[in-house]
Image (tube, grey):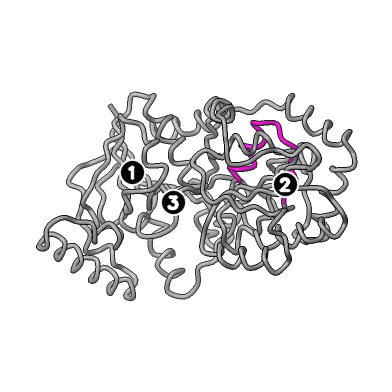
Amino acid sequence: MKKILILNIGTNIGGIESSLINFLHYLSGKNYHVDLVLWKDSGPLYQLIPSSVHIIHGLSPGSLKTILRTPGMLKKGKRILWYTVLKILHYFKKPWFILKRIPKHYDVAISYCQNGYSPYYLIDKVSADKRYMWYHHGSYEKKGKDYKIDTQYYPRLDGIIAVSTSCKEAVAEKFPYMDNKISVINNIINIDRIREKAKEKIFDIDKEKDKFMFVTVSRFSYEKGIDVAIKTAAELKRAGCPFIWYFIGTGEDMEKIKMMVKERQLEDTCILLGEKTNPFPYVSLADIYIQTTRVEAHPITIAEAMVLQKVIVATKIPAITAMLEDGYLGEVCPLDERLFADAILKLVKRSADRTKYIDRLKQFPMTNQAAFHAIDELINL
């Protein structure tokens, strides 16, 4: 039986985390022994980890919130000291040196994200025949010391797995000497689960018959472009479009977005619902699914909307353009609030265009077979 180790930051609601859960469910159905390390062992998606996956605890002190809940003054004090030292060492760029080593050898070890300590811990602290890093970002933006560390560690990996072709190109541009070690495996989409969870009843919204319902599922951060969505909503309201737009998610820009909604007097049209462990009933009810993102690697939320055969308007960036087949399966639009508003208004006014996209998605074969084959090949090399 193959022994596999997977490292990730945590299980908060997000694209990487959703992808991780689907990845774990696929591996749990194979004849593999899977160990999982989470540096933050809590989060809404934690309960979705398959029971067959063995979670390794105690390698790091955890988050400050978790530490403060630790019973016993002595144990809590030790964890606070450990946490403090880790934070101090963070400024010297190699804090993972003080984290515990895993006393076990693996056939394959995977850092399932490029963020945090996982890729470096994988190299310095894990014994494995093969080590891989999954890359889930549509660009590479590190500079200075952070970039220098990556130039030291990335070549020591057996491979980098980019989740889309555009993602691979972004990494290869910064590390051209690693081009032959970068491959593409798209995120796994749990098609059956999406369709099943979309049927669940929701009670916090009512779909209004005389208004178009728009939905966006996203982290609230600059790179996800929720600010552009709010500006687009203001343009639509000025144009007299009858709509209500539900936003599902949270993040560091939440307060900024709330202020934008208030300043533009959009409280009656832009509804911030916060995080939802099951966003699919909302997406299923949408007349149009909208994504005004600035950066994407392999946009899971758009793939999920495709599974539910929704009309989609999304930013014209490489990963999205590829997923929507250059506008054949949904509208792709430059990141500008007026252009987004124009694209949405066109679809609102032309039911034939909406039907066209829905019919195309009904005929489009949503499948994970290529990803499954590539994962099996990687693990069994």
Locate the N terminus by quadrant: top left
Marks 2,1: beta carbons within 8 A: no
The residue carrying mark 1 is: 109
Residue 227 visible somewhere in the drawing: yes
Q: Position of residue 184 (x, y in %)?
A: 55, 42
In reply to whether residue 350 is colored magenta, the answer given is no
| N-term mark: 3 or 2 | 3
Vertical placement of 234 versus 280: above or below?
A: below
Marks 1,3: beta carbons within 8 A: no
Residue located 86% across and 53% down the image: 342
Locate the C terminus by quadrant: top left
**Residue type indicated by callout 1:** Ala
Q: Which mark is residue 37?
A: none
Q: Is residue 224 left or right of residue 3?
A: right
Q: Position of residue 231 (x, y in %)?
A: 74, 62
The residue carrying mark 3 is: 113
**Residue type indicated by callout 2:** Thr
**Residue type indicated by callout 3:** Cys
Q: Position of residue 255 (x, y in %)?
A: 56, 66
The residue carrying mark 2 is: 321
Residue located 90% across and 39% down the image: 350
Of residues 53 and 250, the one nearer the viewer is 250
Residue located 58% across and 30% down the image: 198
In reply to whether residue 306 is colored magenta, the answer given is yes
Q: Nearer the viewer, mark 1 or mark 3?
A: 3
In the image, the segment drawn in magenta is 299-314
